[in-house]
Amino acid sequence: MANTYTQLYFHIVFAVKGRKNHISIKWKDELYKYITGIVSNKKQKLLIINGMPNHIHLLIGTKPNCNLSDLVRDIKANSSKWINEKKLIPGKFEWQTGFGAFTVSQSQLPKIIEYIKKQEEHHLTKTFKEEYIEFLNAYQIDFKPEYIFKDE
Protein backbone atom coordinates (compact mmCIF):
# COMPACT_ATOMS: atom_id res chain seq x y z
CA MET A 1 0.00 0.00 0.00
CA ALA A 2 1.49 3.33 -1.08
CA ASN A 3 -0.08 5.57 1.56
CA THR A 4 -0.88 5.46 5.25
CA TYR A 5 -4.48 5.99 6.30
CA THR A 6 -5.41 6.33 9.95
CA GLN A 7 -8.18 7.57 12.17
CA LEU A 8 -6.87 8.09 15.70
CA TYR A 9 -8.92 9.99 18.27
CA PHE A 10 -8.19 10.49 21.96
CA HIS A 11 -10.37 11.89 24.71
CA ILE A 12 -7.81 13.44 27.07
CA VAL A 13 -8.56 14.55 30.61
CA PHE A 14 -6.33 16.25 33.16
CA ALA A 15 -6.81 18.39 36.23
CA VAL A 16 -5.37 21.38 37.97
CA LYS A 17 -2.88 20.28 40.64
CA GLY A 18 -4.81 19.36 43.76
CA ARG A 19 -7.97 19.84 41.69
CA LYS A 20 -8.10 23.46 42.76
CA ASN A 21 -10.73 25.62 41.05
CA HIS A 22 -8.19 27.88 39.35
CA ILE A 23 -9.59 28.04 35.80
CA SER A 24 -11.75 31.16 35.82
CA ILE A 25 -14.77 31.61 33.58
CA LYS A 26 -13.30 35.07 32.85
CA TRP A 27 -10.33 33.66 30.92
CA LYS A 28 -11.10 30.01 30.18
CA ASP A 29 -12.02 30.73 26.53
CA GLU A 30 -8.67 32.47 26.07
CA LEU A 31 -6.94 29.43 27.63
CA TYR A 32 -8.84 27.08 25.34
CA LYS A 33 -7.80 29.12 22.28
CA TYR A 34 -4.19 29.02 23.48
CA ILE A 35 -4.34 25.23 23.90
CA THR A 36 -5.94 24.93 20.45
CA GLY A 37 -2.92 26.77 19.06
CA ILE A 38 -0.51 24.41 20.83
CA VAL A 39 -2.27 21.36 19.36
CA SER A 40 -2.42 22.95 15.91
CA ASN A 41 1.28 23.87 16.00
CA LYS A 42 2.03 20.21 16.77
CA LYS A 43 0.15 19.33 13.54
CA GLN A 44 -2.70 17.57 15.38
CA LYS A 45 -6.42 18.43 15.30
CA LEU A 46 -8.39 19.57 18.34
CA LEU A 47 -12.05 18.74 17.79
CA ILE A 48 -13.36 20.19 21.07
CA ILE A 49 -12.12 21.45 24.41
CA ASN A 50 -14.13 22.25 27.53
CA GLY A 51 -13.97 21.71 31.22
CA MET A 52 -14.59 22.98 34.68
CA PRO A 53 -12.61 25.25 37.01
CA ASN A 54 -10.55 22.23 38.17
CA HIS A 55 -10.05 20.12 35.01
CA ILE A 56 -10.32 20.03 31.22
CA HIS A 57 -11.35 17.59 28.52
CA LEU A 58 -9.91 17.57 25.00
CA LEU A 59 -10.88 15.48 21.99
CA ILE A 60 -7.91 15.30 19.65
CA GLY A 61 -7.42 13.62 16.30
CA THR A 62 -3.80 12.58 15.93
CA LYS A 63 -1.48 11.47 13.18
CA PRO A 64 0.27 8.12 13.62
CA ASN A 65 3.62 9.78 14.35
CA CYS A 66 2.20 11.69 17.31
CA ASN A 67 3.63 10.74 20.68
CA LEU A 68 0.62 11.33 22.91
CA SER A 69 2.64 11.75 26.11
CA ASP A 70 4.82 14.40 24.47
CA LEU A 71 1.77 16.21 23.12
CA VAL A 72 0.05 16.33 26.52
CA ARG A 73 3.33 17.35 28.18
CA ASP A 74 3.63 20.26 25.75
CA ILE A 75 0.00 21.30 26.22
CA LYS A 76 0.36 21.29 30.00
CA ALA A 77 3.80 22.95 30.12
CA ASN A 78 2.99 25.72 27.65
CA SER A 79 -0.49 26.46 28.98
CA SER A 80 0.67 26.63 32.60
CA LYS A 81 3.52 28.92 31.54
CA TRP A 82 0.98 31.12 29.72
CA ILE A 83 -1.30 31.29 32.80
CA ASN A 84 1.65 32.12 35.06
CA GLU A 85 3.11 34.77 32.73
CA LYS A 86 -0.28 36.48 32.53
CA LYS A 87 -0.61 36.21 36.34
CA LEU A 88 -4.18 34.93 35.96
CA ILE A 89 -4.17 33.44 39.46
CA PRO A 90 -2.42 34.46 42.65
CA GLY A 91 0.57 32.17 43.16
CA LYS A 92 1.79 29.49 40.79
CA PHE A 93 -0.52 27.56 38.46
CA GLU A 94 0.25 23.87 37.87
CA TRP A 95 -1.49 20.93 36.23
CA GLN A 96 -1.59 17.59 38.04
CA THR A 97 1.00 14.98 37.17
CA GLY A 98 -0.29 12.52 34.59
CA PHE A 99 -3.47 12.44 32.51
CA GLY A 100 -6.20 10.16 31.27
CA ALA A 101 -6.37 9.30 27.57
CA PHE A 102 -9.13 7.19 26.13
CA THR A 103 -9.43 6.04 22.52
CA VAL A 104 -12.57 6.99 20.64
CA SER A 105 -13.96 5.41 17.49
CA GLN A 106 -15.35 7.47 14.61
CA SER A 107 -18.89 6.33 15.45
CA GLN A 108 -18.53 7.62 19.03
CA LEU A 109 -17.27 11.12 18.11
CA PRO A 110 -20.71 12.83 18.25
CA LYS A 111 -21.41 11.30 21.67
CA ILE A 112 -18.02 12.35 23.10
CA ILE A 113 -18.28 15.85 21.61
CA GLU A 114 -21.69 16.25 23.23
CA TYR A 115 -20.33 14.92 26.53
CA ILE A 116 -17.46 17.42 26.51
CA LYS A 117 -19.82 20.29 25.55
CA LYS A 118 -22.03 19.52 28.55
CA GLN A 119 -19.37 19.47 31.28
CA GLU A 120 -21.21 21.98 33.47
CA GLU A 121 -24.34 19.84 33.30
CA HIS A 122 -22.49 16.61 34.19
CA HIS A 123 -20.85 18.18 37.20
CA LEU A 124 -24.11 19.24 38.78
CA THR A 125 -24.43 15.64 39.94
CA LYS A 126 -20.89 14.23 40.13
CA THR A 127 -17.41 15.30 41.12
CA PHE A 128 -14.40 15.19 38.85
CA LYS A 129 -13.03 12.26 40.86
CA GLU A 130 -16.29 10.32 40.36
CA GLU A 131 -16.27 11.15 36.64
CA TYR A 132 -12.64 10.09 36.25
CA ILE A 133 -13.15 6.78 38.07
CA GLU A 134 -16.15 6.09 35.82
CA PHE A 135 -13.90 6.55 32.77
CA LEU A 136 -11.25 4.22 34.18
CA ASN A 137 -13.89 1.59 34.91
CA ALA A 138 -15.65 2.00 31.54
CA TYR A 139 -12.35 1.49 29.71
CA GLN A 140 -11.43 -1.39 32.04
CA ILE A 141 -8.22 0.29 33.17
CA ASP A 142 -6.65 -1.24 36.25
CA PHE A 143 -5.91 1.36 38.88
CA LYS A 144 -5.32 1.71 42.58
CA PRO A 145 -7.67 4.34 44.05
CA GLU A 146 -4.99 5.58 46.45
CA TYR A 147 -2.78 6.61 43.50
CA ILE A 148 -5.32 8.34 41.26
CA PHE A 149 -4.95 11.78 42.82
CA LYS A 150 -1.70 11.28 44.65
CA ASP A 151 -0.61 14.93 44.26
CA GLU A 152 -3.48 16.25 46.39
Image (cartoon, helix red, strand yellow):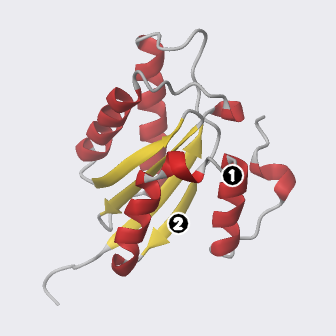
Q: How far apart are the two marked residues, 1 and 2, measured between alpha carbons? A: 20 Å
Q: Secondary structure at mark 2?
A: strand
Q: Residues within 10 Å of mark 2 (few under 14, many from 20)?
A: some
Residue 96 in picture, x, y percent from top left? 64, 37
Identify the image quadrant of the N terminus: bottom left
- Res 14 quadrant in image: top right
Residue at 47% x, 32% y: name it: 77
Residue 56 in picture, x, y percent from top left? 50, 43
Say whether residue 17 is visible: yes
Side (left or right) of 140 relative to 22: right
Q: Residue 126 bears which disc, if any?
A: 1
Please report whichever mark, 1 or 2, sits nearer to the chain's N-terminal start.
2
Q: Would you place residue 101 above or below residue 125 in this image?
A: below
Residue at 52% x, 66% y: name it: 102
Residue at the disc numbered 2: 102
- Res 104 quadrant in image: bottom left
Residue 8 in picture, x, y percent from top left? 35, 71
Q: Nearer the viewer, residue 114 or 43?
A: 114
> Which three-letter amino acid code belongs to the residue tagged 1?
Lys
